[in-house]
Image (cartoon, rainbow, N blue to C red):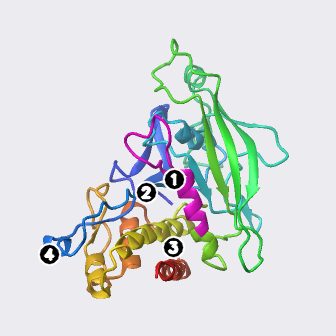
Amino acid sequence: MLPTLGDQAIRYHLDNPIQENDYINASWISEPAFELPDSLLSQLPDSQPPQPQTWIASQGPLDRTCYEFWRIFLHPDVARRPKVIIQLTAFEERSAVKCARYKPDEEESPREFSPYRTVKPDPSPSNPNPRWDWAPPDQAQMSALGRIQVTLQSKQLGPVPRDGSGSFYRKNKLLVELLPAQDEQNQQGIQPILQKAIVTHYECTGWHDHGTPDSVEPILELIDSAKADSKISGPEDSAQSTSPILVHCSAGVGRTGTLIAIASCNAQLAHLRSYNLPDHVLQNIISHLGPPRLVLEPRRIPALPAELNGDLVARTVDFLREQRVIMVQTPGQLDFVYKAVAHFSASLS
């Protein structure tokens, strides 16, 4: 699965390319917004819409991309530095590897990760058309980039659902550190980054690939908890109130897209329901849902049929797919989005 490459504003770029390679399989995801005509604006009371949540949809790290993955969380710019990870896959499912083990297990000591670069191997009789391979960067850049160490500081189980089934996630506190600390006298063209960061990691291992959870309540609770943990406090809280949330499964589209679609729909719905509008006005507003300004060239995919103009879920998923392909991958996952949004809508009544 490749991220959207054409729009440079959407693909996540590493600020410190490794041997001129800034690629990581992750995409900026912005929630859609309402572009309302004056005739509809006049029907709304004066109210400031909530600040939309920014997301990063990512492929699960590979064995040789864990360093690049963790560097995202050491970015010096608070607007680009996530504080929260939502992991929606087990590391292995049915004996198949779905994601590298990019954090310590409960019994382990801190884990360290080093940078790698991609190289083109020489052809051989057994492999006449090699694609690429991994290799460490040259010694000078390896020294400048350093290593990243991840330490598990604490863990706790999430709430147990009313049906008595096990907790849907485990919440981990991780310390991410750059080793050794960057030497300002020997940067080798490397952009400065944070030396350490605390990251909240939601580990959800019961949602299998191409499937859906048994109920919607744990997902809704997870979204609320992750958003609360993404809030920025202190002196940095001048430009925005939340940091990006990074979500990944295996490919970073199916389960990842499903969760982001639910969160995006519910945020819009909560704002609209606060106006106590009649249903026909509400549907008219939904029909004016517009692509986020992050999408510079919308309509890379076919337009939705006109009868779906008032469908909040369909339009939201459509705009997510403008930013990362195959978001919400299966009919069952789309049905789960409708169920979760309907459940949330009923809770607002």
Under tag 3, what secondary structure?
Answer: loop
Instruction: Name the mark on residue 314.
Output: none
Measure the C-alpha gap from mark 4 to mark 3: 36 Å
The residue at which mark 3 appears reads as: 329
Mark 1 crowd level (few <14, some 14–19, many ≥20, 10 Å Cα): many
Quote the CA–CA distance across marks 1 and 4: 35 Å
- Which residue position is annotated with label 2? 53
Q: Residue at x 49, y 37 (%)?
A: 234
Please, which residue is most extreme toward the left here? 38
Tell me which amino acid carries mark 2: Gln
Q: Are marks 3 and 2 in contact (CB under 8 Å)?
A: no
Q: Which mark is residue 39?
A: 4
| Label 2 residue SS | loop
Q: Is residue 227 inside the magenta stretch? A: yes
Disc 3 residue type? Gln
- Percent of width and height locating residue 21: 47, 37
Q: Earlier in the sequence, mark 4 or mark 3?
A: 4
| Magenta span includes 237 | yes
Find residue 166 and report its image quarter: bottom right
Is 294 drawn above or below residue 325 in the view shown?
Answer: above
| Residue at x-position 55% and y-position 49% | 129
Which of 138 and 215 lies nearest the eye of the viewer? 215
* Dot 4 amino acid type: Ser
Sequence-first tag of 1 and 2: 2
Q: Which residue is mark 1?
A: 245
Residue nearest the observer in this picture, 228 or 257: 228
Point 62% across, 35% down: residue: 135
Residues shaded magenta: 221-246
Q: Are the residues flagged by discs 1 and 2 in contact, CB closer than 8 Å? A: yes
**Residue 39 drawn at (x, y percent):** 14, 75
Q: Nearer the viewer, mark 4 or mark 2?
A: 4
Residue 179: x, y in percent? Answer: 65, 26
